[in-house]
Image (cartoon, coloured by chain):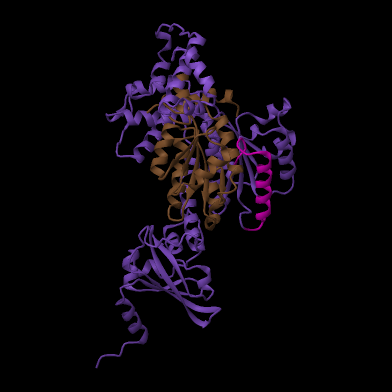
Chain colours: A purple, B brown
């Protein structure tokens, strides 16, 4: 006579016949059961999934199983006893799931059953009403994915270069990432100041869970800077929320003295965010010239990282150029291996007034032009090809203009365009040019475009 | 940064055929562009509209020092954030502000972290955004090419065609 099946075995058998993935968590969020549909969906065996503890976080740099558990984690309100629907994800594939508390009592459930839809969500499958706020889980997932991407993008080992300078910068970045001291990154435009500051933030402990708050000092008015910083200080607390985040003041050397005074007052008190700043010029020199406040410079400059112009670290150009080439490869179908020796020589000879940003743009342009496996010298932008040729070419004769004739030519063209736009209507053309009709008529006669009546 | 300070860096990054910087709005309906025009007082500042991120990227490639106003939607949020982060490398002279429905105010921190210089949910209160756009355009490097070419490209009522 066959042994009767236990109720647990029978229950598992029933769940395994259900086409939707089902998993069960205990009251600590540990996965204690997965049906066959769930194992098939996730693509792992019971030995991997059972015992995984689901924790609700956005940390990007975790072990694959922890990342899997985070993707299956129910929202905290479900673990607290509320029946809830949420989106779960496995390797970027999202599905809607219903979380049902199993209960000793509603406030303290013994566990949760998660019943997952049988199909992945399409991108436009569930466009919510426009006025509805995104549920906290959706935003949480988006923050999680964003932080993961940023942590990959901004890694200290990606600060490329074999030069002594590049090595020094990497060491300083590692040092800065390991503490909460204020950091000032100084360098010419295009040298990567913002990139270095972001790398410090995402490499540190705070970067994994707290915001980087950049402020573009050259674009904000004094009132807006002040109100923004007051709002940041008011909504952060030292022990939670965005309290471990980073405030990044961009181009801080462009601030006027009155804004600097207000900033110094605000930042002198215990500001809840870590302070970082970028500047085009060293603050010590500006302070000596009376163009920057010494107290604010002191607040912002516990660690100073100086980035030299690209022309002063030419040894790094081949490696940087190859990096930008591979970025261009990753963006499109064309795959190039590298640069010809002559192309590298030209890159080395060019002065790079735009620094790494200009090198990145030049490599992108060359990548678009190239039709062989390598970037050849003829693929480089003309200004780079010609710059290193200058001593070999005779100086061009200076071109001159006759100012009055040049201006008259432009004015004639402007009037012709206005008349064309106005379909010959002189009153309308005059309005387009911001003048009266009689004045337009006088100019037409003076420029020889119409005979005097 | 003064205009003189831009000379070496800005010109080095402006393509030969780059048009002059202006305000470039990417949104579904047109109301944010209308608000910007009213606040900025066009034709003093040119405001160009696009409806998709792809069109916006093409327009930005033609005028790479422009000031962008990008509409955030719930369904397109991640795509917009990723595009903003990538675009900072490709268009280092441009700056972007983000506008959105009030229901998306929770995205403010994320949007700023992705590189936006401003975030607002109010199409009726754009003075701060307009001020920032004007300051950016004042600081932006002039377009390359002939002086006459720059004059034609900056006309608010377009060319002769």
The image shows residue B7, relative to residue A293, as above or below, that is above
* Residue A188 percent coordinates (x, y): 56, 28
Report the number of numbered marks: 0
* Residue A343 percent coordinates (x, y): 36, 23
Q: Residue furthest left?
A: A1
Closest to the observer, A23 or A414: A414
Closest to the observer, A183 or A278: A278
The image shows residue A120, relative to residue A84, as above or below, that is above
Q: Check the picture and name the quadrant holding the N terminus of chain A.
A: bottom left
The image shows residue A327, relative to residue A363, as above or below, that is below
Which residues are drawn in magenta?
A215-240
* Residue A35 percent coordinates (x, y): 34, 74
Q: In this rendering, does residue A401 appear at all?
A: yes
Q: Residue furthest bottom?
A: A1
Residue visible at 72% across and 25% down in the picture? A289
Query: Residue A439 falls in which quadrant of the image?
Result: top right
Q: In this rendering, does residue A310 appear at all?
A: no
Residue visible at 32% across and 81% down in the picture? A14
* Residue A161 percent coordinates (x, y): 47, 32
- Does residue A233 belong to the magenta stretch? yes
The image shows residue A209, relative to residue A223, as above or below, that is below
Residue visible at 56% across and 78% down in the picture? A107
Determine whether, in the image, residue A264 is placed left or right of residue A218: right
- Does residue A273 belong to the magenta stretch? no
């Amino acid at each position: 006579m066959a042994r009767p099946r236990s109720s647990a075995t029978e229950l598992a058998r029933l769940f395994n016949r259900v086409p939707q993935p089902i998993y069960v968590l205990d009251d600590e969020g540990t996965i204690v059961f997965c049906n066959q549909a769930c194992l098939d969906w996730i693509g792992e065996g019971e030995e991997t999934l059972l015992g995984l503890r689901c924790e609700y976080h956005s940390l990007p740099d975790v072990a694959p199983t922890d990342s899997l558990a985070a993707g299956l984690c129910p929202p905290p309100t479900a673990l607290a006893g509320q029946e809830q629907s949420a989106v779960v994800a496995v390797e970027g594939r999202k599905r809607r799931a219903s979380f049902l508390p199993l209960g000793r009592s509603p406030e303290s459930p013994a566990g949760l059953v998660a019943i997952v839809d049988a199909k992945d969500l399409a991108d436009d499958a569930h466009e919510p009403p426009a006025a509805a706020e995104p549920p906290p889980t959706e935003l949480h997932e988006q923050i999680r994915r964003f932080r993961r991407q940023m942590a990959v993008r901004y890694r200290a080992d990606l600060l490329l270069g074999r030069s002594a300078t590049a090595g020094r910068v990497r060491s300083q970045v590692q040092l800065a990432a390991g503490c909460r001291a204020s950091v000032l990154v100084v360098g010419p435009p295009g040298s990567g100041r913002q990139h270095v500051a972001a790398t410090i933030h995402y490499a540190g402990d705070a970067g994994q869970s707290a915001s980087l708050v950049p402020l573009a000092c050259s674009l904000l008015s004094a009132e807006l800077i002040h109100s923004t910083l007051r709002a940041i200080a008011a909504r952060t607390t030292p022990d939670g929320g965005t309290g471990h985040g980073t405030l990044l003041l961009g181009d801080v050397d462009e601030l006027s003295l009155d804004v600097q005074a207000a900033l110094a007052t605000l930042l002198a008190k215990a500001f809840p965010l870590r302070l970082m700043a970028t500047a085009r010029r060293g603050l010590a020199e500006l302070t000596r010239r009376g163009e920057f406040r010494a107290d604010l410079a002191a607040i912002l400059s516990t660690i100073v990282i100086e980035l030299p112009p690209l022309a002063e670290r030419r040894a790094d150009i081949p490696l940087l150029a190859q990096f930008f080439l591979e970025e261009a490869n990753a963006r499109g179908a064309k795959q190039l291996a590298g640069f010809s020796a002559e192309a590298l020589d030209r890159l080395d000879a060019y002065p790079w007034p735009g620094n790494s940003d200009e090198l990145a743009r030049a490599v992108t342009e060359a990548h678009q032009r190239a039709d062989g496996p390598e970037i050849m010298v003829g693929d480089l932008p003309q200004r780079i090809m010609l710059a290193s040729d200058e001593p070999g070419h005779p100086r061009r004769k200076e071109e001159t203009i006759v100012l009055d004739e040049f201006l008259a030519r432009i004015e004639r063209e402007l009037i012709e365009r206005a008349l064309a736009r106005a379909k010959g209507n002189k009153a309308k053309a005059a309005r387009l040019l911001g003048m009266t009709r009689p004045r337009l008529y006088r100019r037409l006669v003076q420029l020889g475009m119409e005979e005097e009546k | 940064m003064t205009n003189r300070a831009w000379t070496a860096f800005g010109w080095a990054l402006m393509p030969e055929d780059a048009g002059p910087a202006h305000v470039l709005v990417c949104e579904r309906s047109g109301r944010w562009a209308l608000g910007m025009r009213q606040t900025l007082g066009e034709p003093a500042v040119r405001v160009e509209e696009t409806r998709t991120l792809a069109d916006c990227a093409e327009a930005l490639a033609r005028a790479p020092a422009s000031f962008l106003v990008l509409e955030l939607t719930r369904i397109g949020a991640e795509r917009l954030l990723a595009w903003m982060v990538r675009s900072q490398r490709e268009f280092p002279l441009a700056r972007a502000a983000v506008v959105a429905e009030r229901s998306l105010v929770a995205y403010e921190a994320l949007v700023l972290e992705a590189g936006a210089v401003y975030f607002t949910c109010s199409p009726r209160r754009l003075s701060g955004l307009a001020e920032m756009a004007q300051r950016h355009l004042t600081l932006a490097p002039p377009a390359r090419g002939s002086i006459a070419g720059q004059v034609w490209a900056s006309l608010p009522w377009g060319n002769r065609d």
